[in-house]
Image (cartoon, coloured by chain):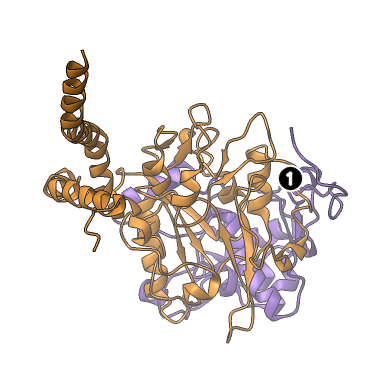
Chain colours: A orange, B purple
Amino acid sequence: MKTLINRRKFLQGGIAASAAATVSLAKKSQAAHFEGYPDSMGVLVDLSRCVGCRSCEAACNQEQNLPTPEKPFNDFSVFDEMHHGQKRRTDETAYTVVNRYDVPGMDHPLFRKIQCNHCQEPACLTSCFVNAYTKTPEGAVIYNADVCVGCRTCMVACPFYIPTFRYSSAFHPRIMKCIFCYDTRLSKGKPPACVEACPQEALTFGRRNDVLNMGRQRIRENPDKYEDHIYGEHEAGGTAWMYISPAPFDKVGMDTTVPKEPILNFVKDFLAIVPMVLTIWPALFTGIHLLATRKDKLEQSKKTEGEV
Amino acid sequence: MTINPKAVLAAAIVLLAGTLPTTGLALEQLDAPETVTIDAISKLYGPVEFSHKRHSQLARCKDCHHHTTGQQDMDPNCIRCHANSPEKMVVSCKDCHTKKMFYPEQVTATDNPNLYHIDKPGIKGAYHLNCIPCHVKKNAPSGCEGCHAMTDAGKKMFRTDVKGKAEGAKHHE
């Protein structure tokens, strides 16, 4: 019967020991929940108002100097497009897209705009090991292509599948995502281009707290018209862009399984172990190795002595 | 907004009539302008020549002017304060709905703790949110260009120069 510890079991033991050693430490190091910058801005998207005119898409394309679209923005056949069985998503040519949803029991379709939701505690930001992302006091999650190494971890980390990669450019690959029009508008006190273009004011821009209150008021005064929920108030720990809807959120393509706490909370404990592993393990295992091979070395030196 | 001479005359009559007891009386549709040119926010789309006369025959004053024309607004929520609101000196949309929606002045308006209407639409929202549902209901034009033609600036933004799916993937850079 083999009772030898194989390498996998040994490593598992090592991880468990390190984890046990750091759990108490990690608990202590856990920062208090970040409530977001005071007076940071937000947008309330009211799906009962959106008519699918795509003005937001057009305005975004113009404001952000994005590539020429395949179809003009007043071409509504895009709502019938399916890509790999999915409705349109943000990509390197579009920071925002509008999709149409036929909700059972409703006599008209609903339209939903997607873009970066600008999380209060963004998963993209926390997952980025070169700090290419910044959450600005105004509420925008912006990106610095100069330091980005193109690892695309942020694309995996984002619970809303928003950041995309510019694969088409061999020389200037970078993450492409909505930046809340930070450079050109938000930092100057202006609303983002999509908001200003929306004819229906389906996008209401204001301080996050204010637009939350507006959302609550609309729901309270029209209980038959809206679902009693503001998507993004708590999802992923709270987002700057939030939605109210006349239909259940999963019927308009929104992920209702997104946790109500920042994605960061799920990896905080693990991330606290990483420095421990990187600093203690090499020394520990070098020591074990030296001890284990010490006998052999001694014997070898005796042998060589005998030969002389 | 341009107002035709008839409207000026009508307004004068209203002002003169202002000395009369007005309790229970409301602005009459005759007092109103025949057409209103809506061009305050015209940029991507051209101005709208709005036939006020025609619309006043299809809808009640309060459907668009809320409580300002002296017609009692029956919306149970509005009536809490506006049950006896008299007609106002100003009834034009732009007198209450701002053109500079979502700019700092409007964004910080909620600092006033006494402000009840924290969610009042700007002028663009007021028009579209009020016009479109009625147009849909009455089978009137409800697409963008049914009411206003796209301007050159609009065509540029909507990239109407792009014709369908481009042949061969067009890559930038």
Where does the N terminus of chain A fall, quadrant-wise?
A: bottom left
Q: Nearer the viewer, residue B134 or A122?
A: A122
Q: Residue at x 23, y 43 (%)?
A: A272
User: x and y percent of residue A153 in the render?
Assistant: 46, 44
Query: Measuring 64% from the left and 74% from the top, which residue is drawn there?
Result: B133
Identity of the residue drawn at 61% across and 57% down: A89
On screen, residue A95 versus residue B159, left or right, reads: left
The C terminus of chain A sits in image quarter: top left
Instruction: State the SS at label 1.
Output: helix
Q: Disc 1 marks which residue?
A: B157
Q: Residue furthest bottom?
A: A105
Q: Quadrant of residue A277?
A: top left
Q: Position of residue A250 (x, y in %)?
A: 49, 73
In this picture, residue A104 sits left or right of residue B114: right
Q: Is residue A189 above or below residue A99?
A: above
The residue sitting at the top extreme is A308
Quarter holding residue A237: bottom left
Evaluate whether residue A32 shows in this view.
no
Left or right side of A144 for B45:
right
Across and down, in percent, residue B38 comes to 70, 54
Q: Residue at x 85, y 50 (%)?
A: B166
* Above or below B37: residue A124: above
